[in-house]
Amino acid sequence: MAKQPMLKFVKVERAMPDKRDASARKEDFQEIYSEYAKAKAQEQSSRCSQCGVPYCQSHCPLHNNIPDWLRLTAEGRLKEAYEVSQATNTFPEICGRICPQDRLCEGNCVIEQSGHGTVTIGAVEKYITDRAWEEGWVEAIKPHVERPESVGIIGAGPGGLAAADVLRRQGIQVTVYDRYDRAGGLLTYGIPGFKLEKPIVMRRNEQLAAGGVTFRLNCTVGVDISFQEIRDTHDAVIIATGVYKTRDLQGPGSGAKGIVRAIDFLTASNRKSFGDAVPEFDSGELNASGKKIVVIGGGDTAMDCVRTAIRQGATSVKCLYRRDRSNMPGSQREVQNAEEEGVIFEWLTAPKGFKGDRVTGVIAERMRLGMPDATGRQSPEVIEGSDYFEEADIVIKALGFEPEDLPTLWDQPELGVTRWGTVKAEFTTGATDMPGVYAVGDIVRGASLVVWAIRDGRDCANAILEQMNGAAVIAAE
Ligand code: FAD
Ligand code: SF4
Ligand code: SF4
């Protein structure tokens, strides 16, 4: 009988790849986890119990065939594992690094629920595709036929790029427009290198360009080119512009100098890592070096800001969040990483006002959690008389993002939006109210996740292909 390579979770303990020591990792912007050695990846994959109904798969937004690629990895059949993994995910090595696995695939792994520690799905997914890149198995797209139809995609984030990949593989002419000088959206300029090193993103951009995707960078739609012109040029248009309007702070002094937006702070830091000239960083405006930093917010953006500030050499970094640790929206894994690196969390604390024309600190007040609201979440309430002063040279607002008003910016009143300002789109296809216009990713969902943007981009591209194929058949009849 063949040797059983799987079901080893009772004998083999869960082991993540080694994490670099906090004192070393806070000195640079390199990723904090190292790669598995081949034997370790095989061993960890072999812990999977090959569930008949794999909850990991149903809780992955891409419905990745996780049990299949774990088994292939355990058997040492890496190329096949890569083929299976990339069949459902455009950027598996990126998801393996930055998906909040504890809330998605791994959070639903049955062996975790039986007390054995989840299979390390994300780390194995990363391992498989990193090896595929090393071995040269990841190739530029080569469509079997070139087709005449073209699609214009506005936004080169994961949503737009995932759609571009699917369409180009079928020979569609694809042009991606982006206001930035590099493609990748928040993968390039939002998420810091210690979670996702930039060469990982750049090689994907190069792969798409080598496969015939045309990039028009430094091109802001609504300024350098009108939306109508893009619509007139292409058979279909996908809006994948993400959400970038920062939620603002309230209270006296909230307009003071030195109170900065998280996205500006993170973009400046990422640009520095590319070696770009960044005057606002060099002037100190967006540089935490030698300064006391206060970050306001409790989501993943706030976690990225505190950990970036530590790496820039801040003298102290504090994070103020109005709820407690168990009620924060950010990943617990990231909080732990931040604490290890020296960040101090002030839970149940909110800003009431700010001192100084150039900020010198935050007047903060303590909160307690009150009655649950309509969603069942406990609302924070102020504890009267609990004010105190938190010194700060830079305050970073990381309270979340909202969509820009695209119908006004692009002079397209008929583009329907929801009451939150996100573009109204049919969830399985991305179709909007305007014929031939689709929308995907954060601009539809509100601030969400990379893996959902990829899912939307892929679904939308398939819907466009179906529509185009139907039209081609009718034309031929
Ligand atoms: P984006 O990635 O925002 O890309 C939109 C693109 O559209 C940008 O390149 C922008 O320049 C371009 N654009 C916008 N307007 C125009 C215009 N008028 N003309 C031309 N181009 C335009 N998700 C995770 O899964 N894991 C994480 O760890 C994680 N960390 C995050 C950290 C931070 C700091 C932030 C802000 C977000 C994080 N997210 C994370 C969320 C994730 O990055 C987003 O959900 C995802 O990038 C959305 O993809 P998208 O393609 O919809 O938009
Ligand atoms: Fe898990 Fe994300 Fe990979 Fe899906 S894409 S298997 S959720 S890490
Ligand atoms: Fe394997 Fe866990 Fe998925 Fe079951 S839920 S198939 S044990 S990874």
Image: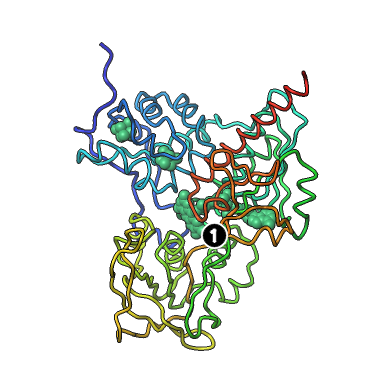
Give the vertical position of 123 relative to 301 (above or below). above
Q: Position of residue 300 (x, y in %)?
A: 43, 59
Residue farthest toward the top in the current orientation of the protein: 1
Give the vertical position of 282 relative to 274 (above or below). below
Choose between 78 and 475: the one closer to the eye. Answer: 475
* Left or right of 196 in this view: 226: right
Q: Which amino acid does label 1 sit on?
A: Trp
* Left or right of 225 in this view: 16: left
| Residue 188 seen in render | no
Q: Where is residue 345 in the image (x, y as percent from the top left)?
A: 33, 69
| Residue 455 seen in render | yes
Q: Does the residue labelled 1 lie within 8 Å of ligand 1?
A: no
Choose between 473 and 207: the one closer to the eye. Answer: 473
Q: Position of residue 400 (x, y in %)?
A: 49, 63
Q: Classify residue 42 by image quadrant.
A: top left
Q: Classify residue 143 by image quadrant.
A: top right
Q: In which quarter of the image is the C terminus?
A: top right
**Visual colour scheme:** rainbow
Determine the residue positioned at 25% across, 27% down.
7
The residue singled out by tag 1 in the image is 420
Determine the residue positioned at 46% across, 24% down.
80
Give the vertical position of 473 relative to 92 (above or below). above
Local SS, label 1 = loop
Q: Quadrant of the N terminus?
A: top left
Q: Position of residue 395 (x, y in %)?
A: 47, 76
Determine the residue positioned at 44% across, 46% down.
97
Residue count near mark 1 (Cα–Cα under 10 Å), binned few <14, some 14–19, many ≥20 = few
Quick check: which quadrant has ligand 2? top left
Choose between 169 and 292: the one closer to the eye. Answer: 169
Determine the residue positioned at 41% across, 39% down.
60
